Image (tube, rainbow, N blue to C red):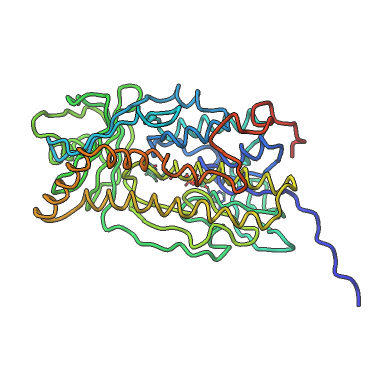
Amino acid sequence: MSNPQPHPPFDTEVLVVGAGPTGLALATTLRRAGHDPLVVERLTEGQGTSRAAVIHAHTLEVLESLGIGERLLGEGIRLSRFSIRDRDETLVRLRFDRLPSDHACLLMVTQDRTEHVLREALAEARGRVQWGTTVKSIVASGGGVTAALETREGTRRVRARYVVGADGMHSLVRTAADIGFTGSTYEESFVLADVEMDWPPGRDEVMLFFSPPGLVVVAPLAHGRFRVVATMQDAPLRPGVEDVQRLLDERGPQSVRSRVTAVHWSSRFRLHHRVADHYRSGPFLLVGDAAHVHSPAGGQGMNTGLVDACVLGRMLAEVLDGRQPDEWLDRYEGLRRPAAQQVLGLAGRLTAMATMKGAARRWARNLVLRTIGMLPPARRKLEMGLSGLARRDAARLPGGHVTDSRNMMPAWHRSAPPALPQR
Ligand SMILES: Cc1cc2nc3c(=O)[nH]c(=O)nc-3n(C[C@H](O)[C@H](O)[C@H](O)COP(=O)(O)OP(=O)(O)OC[C@H]3O[C@@H](n4cnc5c(N)ncnc54)[C@H](O)[C@@H]3O)c2cc1C
């Protein structure tokens, strides 16, 4: 009997599918650790849309390992207060400037700017993205995966030891790994708009208003703009000035009137509430929206994905460097999936409270929130949950490595990454 043929060598150690925020953060983490992932993205350039508008304190701590904290701060504005209101009444006001963190703030920065900073960080680490390249199929083979890539030049096959699905909610990687995405879809849609307006309550606080027709959030952005987010039954495809004005009139403060003068970007999307049943299956791994999606209430989606990416990047580097066995990667799910479940719980509770039907239930809700507002420990719990600092342990690598402190990073994290041959 002849010996089995040895596996052909891998073309790349790690194939990263998707160059959204999580794919870029993961690739930069690997690159800074001296590895050379192959990053493919079906778009020909970044999406360039506003979408996620806040970066929380814990995410900023974790992103220190990529050396981009200062640049992100330069792209956005720092806020310290977040209030939950019922029209004119403040039910609870949270403070983010007294958090136990070097980054005690809400950093308001639009996703296109965050992705721009992440693309720069990857380029500085001498990594790159293969734009205009779509993964059409992936199968497990020979201890890794084989992926069919469609590029401008035609189709080619790539063999990788690991594939990371950073490919968003409709993840092909998750489907190829036959991992379920358990959860449900909300009845309502959300609308988002970046607007210019006269807003008498001012520019130093994020405000979430409850009202019988639904919630509306108003958050100041850089360049004098505001982000408006609202639930809506039959949302228009591209909400305009009048739509946003109506939402603010019906749901915002009654004692003062806003005046929307321009809409710079707007969108609507359907809400899902789902977590992947597993974060790993053999050579398949998931990060970001491929692993969890939920309501934007509390602005947690992209933040959770960025932490996933930095944690998984560090774990993969440990395994590729031979410091940990392959099975160590199984612990990624145990670290990050509970964090996503906590975030889903938090975002789900906020959304349920905001969209509560019936005067008696809304009265009871307001009573609970007023009570939280008067109790410092209860307020602090909410501040720690929203800032992500309550989930610091879920960014601590098994074995004691910490992803949230520059001082604990190995030397390569603080210096120029080693050069690797370009593909
Ligand atoms: C309209 C809208 C508004 C949002 N607002 C907020 C908000 O206010 N706050 C918040 O926290 N979050 C918000 N989100 C969610 C936030 O944008 C996501 O959490 C974040 O983008 C997730 O990043 P990601 O890298 O995991 O996935 P994505 O950003 O979805 O990136 C996935 C990438 O993979 C690529 N890709 C997919 N399949 C393939 C393939 N087969 N081959 C090659 N490439 C592929 C896609 O082109 C895409 O670029 C919003 C999302 C939307 C759509």
Given residues 289 and 379, the one toward you in this image is 379
Say whether residue 127 is left or right of residue 368. right
- Residue 327 location, x and y as percent? 66, 58
Can you tell which quarter of the image residue 209 is in? top left
Residue 309, placed above or below residue 70: below
Say whether residue 98 is left or right of residue 147. left
- Where's the N terminus, which quadrant? bottom right
Residue 388, placed above or below residue 114: below
* x 54%, y 30%: residue: 64
Furthest residue toward right: 1
Can you tell which quarter of the image residue 99 is in? top left
Furthest residue toward bottom: 1
- Residue 210 location, x and y as percent? 18, 44
- Residue 164 location, x and y as percent? 60, 51
Given residues 374 and 55, the one toward you in this image is 374
- Where's the C terminus, which quadrant? top right
Say whether residue 17 is left or right of residue 200. right
- Residue 175 location, x and y as percent? 53, 62
How many numbered markers are drawn?
Answer: 0
* x 49%, y 48%: residue: 288
Can you tell which quarter of the image residue 120 is in? top right
Residue 43, placed above or below residue 77: below
Say whether residue 152 is left or right of residue 422. left
* x 61%, y 33%: residue: 408
